[in-house]
Amino acid sequence: MSKNAFAKLLFALFLASLLVIAACNSDSGEEEGGDSEDTDTEETTDDEGSEGEGSEGEEGSEEEDGSDEEASSEDGIYSIEDFDTAVSNDGEPIDGGSITYGLVTDTPFEGTLNWNFYEGTFDAEILTWFDESLLTSDENYNYTQDGAATYEVDDENNVITFTIGDDVNWHDGEPVTAEDWAFSYEVIGDPNYPGVRGSTPGFTLIEGYNEYKEGSADSISGLNVVDEKTLEITYTRLSPSLLTGGIWTYPMAKHIFEGMAIEDIPGSAEVREEPIGFGPFKVETITPGESLTLSAYEDYWRGEPNLDEVTLKVVDPGVIVNALETGDVDMVSSFPVDQYPANADMSNVEFLGDVDLAYTYIGFKLGHWDEEAGEVVYTPEEMKMGDKDLRKAMWHAVNNDAVGEQFYNGLRWAGTTLIPPSHPDYHDDSIEAPGYDVEEANRLLDEAGYEDVNGDGFREDPEGEELVINFASMSGGDTAEPLAQYYIQSWGEVGLNVQLTDGRLLEFNSFYDRVEADDEAIDIYQGAWGVGYDVDPSGLYGRTASFNFPRYASEENDELLEAGVSDKAFDVEYRQDIYSQWQELMVEEIPVFPTLYRSLVLPVNNRVVNYDMGVGSGVYLSELGVTAEESETAE
């Protein structure tokens, strides 16, 4: 298909989708919108809570003249390099004041407001406001000594000693202690722990952790509480991953949760109704799934916050533009990049941007998860998508360059490997990934024995049996339906009968529940991953990673992932080579293929001051302020 023909197809699908959306919403007068395809991973939870970083991302570039003009493009195609990460407002914040932060989603947030147990993206967004990481990170994702705790590394004895600041206290006035930090590890390592964390080297390399998790030890021998504020962790060996996001840096208030059954904690009032933290703001009220109000924590260890109050509330993507224009929200968790061109000149906000630590992808179900063994069972021979040539052909059949331009105006672009360019030291852009090539897709399918036996226009499998590929994709946003239909259409053009699971798009929470449960009604799925500061991908693709949704495993994958966190990997060049080999392996094996790399574009009301979305900016949420009592509205 030519690029021009592709554009016409997308436009037609997009118009058709808008007509359906308009018809469905005629009673309410509201359009659907947004982009709810994200979820969080173990990597993101390990390091994303650093205060004031607002969202993950790589340090952005500033405009050469230092101006605050919005990014512009004559041909309608934009670049993330055109954006700054910090607001240009350099005024003095007023005393007190309040802001409203929009959680942009068409579904309620789950409300599991504890770092050890949360799984949803928006719960993490909420947590960053009232609870935080004990360690902060710099622009290269390395831990610094500027957080609520400092650390010392003993290379000879494989020990890291952490010291929590004397003035770091929970919101109820109790000190944050080394016991709290050790307790957090003990909860995650408990054999009855119902959450998804605990499989990365930051846990498994701790002496005695694996024995404790298996139930053969009563304690984690590598955890040593030296005194009230000092924790020593002894590892079987040190890994380069540890100091780039691999350490679990979220304590858990032992004086509140001790004695509570582990499996009861996620649903407890202490998590869902009255959550506690030690961050700059404390929770006052919660309307489940809808909103929270927070007030300044006057005894916050960095000093009393500038703002008196923060309101966090769910805002449907379809009304986010109106909410910004009217000043109903000052800041947002995300902004649909497909809506940026039409709103780039919004007068009352400034658009910030950065490369996102994330990518979207198509995943193939290749096995299942063994809950008892706690590992992937890779059985491609039993799975519909087990043929590597079939998966490669499906990659060749889609034009992700054009998708990035047509749907996202260049603010998303075709992915090639599973380490995104947010990690420029490790992303290998020399690897040749399957590009858009319909002829090659057809050749691969023909040679693999996928032929149209009965003349209905769709290929049967090599045994001559009907082949229907069930495709799970998420609802949310004007682009969700036409994008899913584009992929289906593209695969149909090479003779593959791909149909939406249940005949419709799936709601966000249902989608991930079913993908994680290895629902037999799902053969392939379109998802997205946020990646952590540490480049180590074992939390997504390791044999013991529950987030390994394609259920892929191999000895070579095991070996490379292990090498990437080995002693040798302290040599950056060695680690770069290992992860280049791993990226190449994933391009060859294709348990998933990346569709788009992403930019994160965030509008911020002009009255907001002291905000920088970049990692390691040194600007913290306690400094966030406003220069006027009322939100500025659009002209």
Image (cartoon, rainbow, N blue to C red):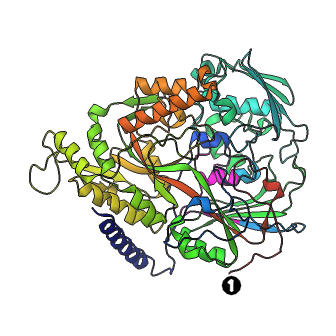
Residue at far left of view: 454
Which residues, given as a range, are shown in magenta?
Answer: 101-127
Amino acid at circle 1: Glu
Question: What x and y, as percent, mark residue 102?
Answer: 65, 65
| Residue appearing at x 60%, y 27% in the figure | 201
Question: What x and y, as percent, mark residue 195?
Answer: 58, 38
| Residue appearing at x 29%, y 41% in the figure | 385
Does residue 281 appear anywhere in the picture? Answer: yes
Residue in the foreground of this view, choosing between 205 and 360: 360
Residue 104 falls in which quadrant of the image? bottom right
Residue at far bottom of view: 635
Question: What x and y, as percent, mark residue 605?
Answer: 72, 71
Q: Is 110 inside the magenta-drawn segment?
A: yes
| Residue appearing at x 45%, y 49% in the figure | 415
Give the vertical position of 635 relative to 547 (above or below). below
Q: Give the side of residue 148 with respect to residue 467, left or right.
A: right
Q: Look at mark 1 in the image and give the residue it sits on.
A: 635
Residue 352 falls in which quadrant of the image? bottom right
Quick one: SS at disc 1? loop
Does residue 111 appear anywhere in the picture? Answer: no
Residue at far front of view: 64
Label 1 neighbour load within 10 Å: few <14, some 14-19, many 20+: few
Q: Give the side of residue 199 with respect to residue 558, left or right.
A: right
Q: Give the side of residue 563 with respect to residue 635, left or right.
A: left
Q: Is 611 inside the magenta-drawn segment?
A: no
Q: Give the side of residue 196 with respect to residue 2, left or right.
A: right
Give the vertical position of 311 relative to 566 (above or below). below
